[in-house]
Amino acid sequence: MNFDFSEDQKLLQKTVRDYLEEHAPLASAREVLETDASYSPELWKGAAELGWLGATIPEEHGGAGFGHLELCLIAEEVGRALAPIPFSSSVYLFTEAILQAGSEAQRKAHLPLLAAGDRIGTFALAEKPGCPTEDSIQATLDGDKLTGAKLAVHDGQTANAAVVAARGPEGVSLVLVDLDGDGVSRQPLDSIDGSRPQASLTFDGAAAEVLGTAGEGWALAESLLDRAAVLLAFEQLGSAQRAFEITKDFTMGRYAFGRPVASFQAVKHRLADLWCSIELARSNAYYGAWALSGDEPELAVAAPGARISATDALELAAEEMVHLHGGVGFTWEYDCHLFYRRSKTLGLALGGAREWRDKLVRRLAAQA
Amino acid sequence: MDFNDTPEEAAFRAEAHAWLAANAELRGPDDPTSSALAEIESEEELQRAKDWQKKKADAGWACITWPKEYGGRGATPIQSVIWGQEEARFRTPPNVFGIGIGMCGPTILTHGTDEQKRRWIPRLVSGEEVWCQLFSEPSAGSDLAGLRTSAVQDGDEWVVNGQKIWTTGAQLCDWGILVTRHDANVAKHAGLTYFVVDMHSAGIEIRPIHQINDGEGFNEVFFSDVRIPDANRIGEVGDGWRVAITTLMNERASIGAGNAGGGDSIMDMIKLAQEVGAFEDSDVRQRIADFYVKRKGLEYTGYRTLTALSQGRTPGPEASMGKLVGAKLMQDMGSFGMDLAGLAGSLAPSAAPADGTFQSQFLGSPGLRIAGGTDEILRNIISERVLRLPPEVRLDKEVAFRDVPTGN
């Protein structure tokens, strides 16, 4: 029994944390939130140089050749720092899509650029508010031309390439689109978390090439979402842990009625419950990491389990963070809102907890 | 990250399994799952439990982490877990030794003299003597150190008067661990002394408590001039609280471990929802998903604890989470499982759908949320001992116990 990361993996995690503590204080997320910037290019460059962007890309394609366990721990640190970079879109979704389904030519064309940080990728599924389903995909693929629109795509403004779900004669396929090419227009959207911006994408005869098998795009999308769910769960876990630590320290230092507010049961019991929620999320995320790294069949339930538990933990952590800071928690000046915004943005990326709960229980029932 | 045994663990598992296979029957798929709510109620069940314990002890498979000189095997904690996993695969009698093995034995091994260990431990290991715990009182539950049962020294004996409550299986037991107040003139925690008491002593009266779930596993125990030899004192006079803490830490770990199972009731709930036509209700699926991630979160936290054990680390007060989350989860699942069955949900466990699993959970879980530390006490433990938040302000710390306000 070894349900833990190895010493080498923990050492890697520490180097990631040390780097982010120096180069990505919370002020850097705030800067992206408060300005027109859509990410931090300096941090992105650092992430490329340190091998994070190519963590799961084989060395022959310019990657670091780590595995998914290492990527899970990098994701946890990215979450801990609220790093303002398009990491989840490019690494958990686009890069994973190429690794899972790309032809040799597609791997050669994309992976080296992704690992070097010279190409940012994203994933475009939803076309209207609500939970996307196979039937809801209306973007059309006619030969190698894509026409249609995608809503609220994370990092849609900055990405150079996207995996897009579209309907062709064979059914729904996933296609690769160069977002810098002809026939693509982008519209930045105001979102609740400007440190992880979103945009709508419109395609008018844009050049597209099928990823994987034509007509089998929905199953591939589901599988990619499962894989990304585990990685994003680690990012959520990192953010939740940081929110908890900042909140705990604040309540220890803040005095009311002549004693630290952390000494009141009304406060400390909330922190104890939050700690339990984060520990449960950590355990579910570890199980997801195990299933992801070994391509285990259990991933079908491990991924939604990790996702739901991490979403619950981060949303609770962010709510408690604002609340237990009292009035200052509601100010723009304090950092609580960075976590509060991020908690919901991450909770809705890949579909909200409601969708994942449904997915989980339907899959459990199918096993019965 | 790997769920497999190390080669040494695999060899130990094979050895354990081989002995079990030669001495017990494998459980069938339809065997009822063992429950944290099980109670022993007959002499015949007790004798079967004793026989099985003796058989294990004779072969060196009882209390395996305890030292060999007292009847144990000197095994590691991870080996104990492996043994437990293997034993759970076989049909065995209900366990009446949980308190003795889980709490009393470890306390005596930690604080007892060599003579005390030689007197009590081997007969606990062999199942010849059954043990109970005499801690809580009508006026001392969460505030256990506020207990009032008095012990007055008389030569080389102590005379004990007072009342204990929530004593599991008292009428079946030969020995009990007992915390008393020997001095009400000093501060609360300083006036306590810890004993082992012969449950067959003159002056002990046992009255069963009729519980919400119709069980009578708990008892009140009355002490009227009960005489205990000084040789039965564990630790120094006035050292009772420190000794009791050892017992309590072991208690929470064993109750938490008992709750970590029960994963099957999620699948029972899905089946029930399908049978009654409720599965297509989105709200039903949402609730089941929440139960599942909590249940699995606890199970996987157990794997993290095992990993710590396997690496030679000792889990600490964070084990309190298992009972805090698990007991409330059982209550919520019981209640929701009953909802699914509609009117039939309020039938008794013996008559209800899904073998009455959810009704048993509903009726039994309130006790689990109280026993061995209430939800609130566990939150205090987590916040003070795991998170290192400031302790409660205490009004009873610097005063003599007799001057502590009591409200009556």
Image (cartoon, coloured by chain):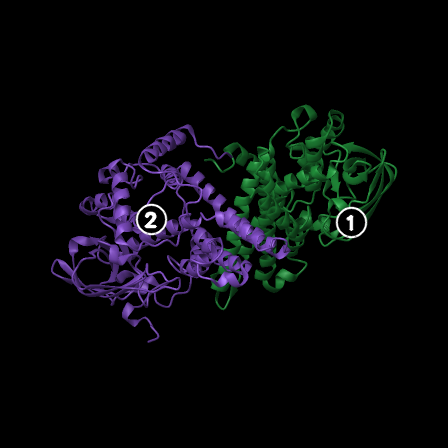
Chain colours: A green, B purple
Q: Is residue B365 left or right of residue A126?
A: left
User: In the rendering, at what x and y percent does residue A189 appear?
Assistant: 79, 51
- Determine the image quadrant of residue A71: top right
Q: Is residue A125 visible?
A: yes
Helix, strand or loop status at disc 2: loop
Q: Is residue A252 visible?
A: no
The residue carrying mark 2 is B94
Q: Chain of mark 2?
A: B
Question: Is label 1 or label 2 in front?
Answer: 2
Determine the CA span between mark 1 and mark 2: 67 Å
Residue type at the position of mark 1: Asp
Residue, far left: B155
Per the rendering, the mark at residue B30 is none
Q: Camera-side residue: B292 or A64? A: B292
Mark 1 vs mark 2: tell me if same chain.
no
User: In the rendering, at what x and y percent does residue B211 appear?
Assistant: 36, 64
Residue type at the position of mark 2: Pro
- Determine the image quadrant of residue B31: top left
Q: Is residue A305 left or right of residue B181?
A: right
The residue carrying mark 1 is A36
